[in-house]
Image (spheres, helix red, strand yellow):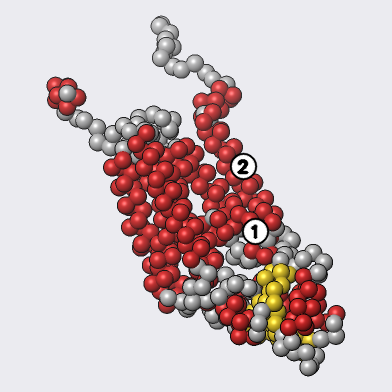
Amino acid sequence: MTQPTRSTDAAPPQGFLAEIKDAVTIRAAVLVLGVLALQLAFITSYIGAFHQPKPSEIRIAVTAPVAPVAEQTAKQLGALPGKPLDPRTVADEATALRQVKNRDVDGALIIDPAGKADRLLVAGGSGAALPQAVEQVIGLAEKAQGRTVQVTDVAPAAAGDGRGLSSFYLVIGWCVGGYLCAAILAISAGARPANISRAVIRLAALLLYSLAAGLLGTLIAGPALDALPGSVMALWGLGTLVVFAVGAITLALQGLAGVVGIGLAILLIVVFGNPSAGGAYPYPLLPPFWKAIGPALPPGAGTYAARSIAYFKGNGAAGPMLVLAAWAVVGSAITLACAEVRKGRPGAAVGSGLPDDAPAVPRFADTGSAGSGSADAR
C-alpha cells in the first residue's frame, strides 16, 4: 500500500507574531499612531479652550452727560482685577450705540449721574456667552458702587438661533465639506495631481462644490429652519469662500505631504480652528493662545463674518473675508505649484495600499495585444 505524499506547495507554518507583521505594515502602524495623536490633540484643544472661560479685555464704551464722570468710571472699570474689560470713553449715547452695532465694541455703559441706575447696551448676536459675561462684570462693578444697571440688547439673536450658535455650526459644516471634498478627490484619483491641468480640474470641481454647499447651507440655516437672519446672497458668498478656502488648503497640504496632508488639514481646521473659532465662547472669553490664533483660521474668520452678516448688517465682516480669501489664494497657488513640480508623478490614490510616491494605477488597463501596446508606448 502506498502512503499519501505531502504537498510541497503548502506554505510553511507561521507564528502569531509573523502573522501580525504580515497583516500590519509599518506604514499602517505609523498612520494609526498619527490618528491617535490627532485624537488626543482634539481632546486637549477643546478641553483646554473651554474648561475655564473668563473675560479678558472685553471692549466697552463708556459715556455720560458729564465727561469727567465717564472718564472716572472708565478708569475704575479698567482697573478691575484680572483686566476683564477694556473700556474707552465716547462722546454720547448715539456714538456708543453706533460702535456696538458696528462691532467696534462689545458693549456700552450709559451713565446717569443724576440717578442710581445706569444702562448697559449689549449685542446678543455676537454669541450669548459674551453679553452674559459683560453683564456679570458690569453688574458687580455697579453693585460695588451702590448702583444698578438695566441691560438692553440692541442686536438680539433670532428666536431660532439658540445661544447665537447657528453661525458657528453653519461655518463648521462648511469647513467639514471643504476638507472632505478635497479628501475624496485624493481617494478617487491620487493624493497628488499629475499635472497643472489635473490640479486646475480639481480646483474647478472644488469651486462648483463650494457654490452648491454655500447656497444649500445658507438656505437650510435661513429660510428652511429660520435660525439665521441676514442676506441670503451675502451668506451664500461667505459659505462659498469658506468651503473653497478649506478645500484649497487641504489640496495644498496633500500636494506637499501626500495622504498625510489630509491629517494635517484636520489638525489645522478641526483641532486648532474649531476651538478658537469664537463659537461657544467668543474671543474675549478664550485663553490667550486660542484668542490669538482664532481670527487667522477659517473657522474663526467664517464664524465672525457670519455673525456680522446676520446681525450687524455686515459690519466687521471685511477683515475675516480677507483672511478667508488669503487662505483660498495661497491654497490654490501651492496646489498648482506642487502639481508643476511633480509633473507626471501623481502618486497612488488613498486606500490603494501603495506608498505616496508610487505611480498611480491606470483606471483602464490596456487589454490590447502586445503589438498595440508597444505602438502606444511609442
Which residue is at a point 75% across and 75% down the rendered structure image? 74
Q: Is residue 33 above or below residue 281?
A: above
Q: CA distance from mark 1 to mark 2?
A: 23 Å
Q: Nearer the viewer, residue 95 or 54?
A: 95
Q: Secondary structure at mark 2?
A: helix
Q: Which residue is mark 1?
A: 291
Q: State the count of labels.
A: 2
Q: Is residue 96 visible?
A: yes
Nearer to us: label 1 or label 2: 1
Q: Is residue 185 above or below residue 8?
A: below
Give the position of the C terminus as an image quadrant.
top left
Query: Between residues 145 and 113, which one lies in front from this camera angle?
Result: 113
Residue receiving disc 2: 37
Note whether residue 190 is visible: no
Q: Tell me the amino acid under the disc marked 1.
A: Lys
Front position in the image: 37 or 280: 280
Does dot 1 land on a helix, a strand or a loop? Answer: helix
- Give neighbour class at mark 1: few <14, some 14-19, many 20+ (Cα, 10 Å): many
Which quadrant does the N terminus fall into? Answer: top left
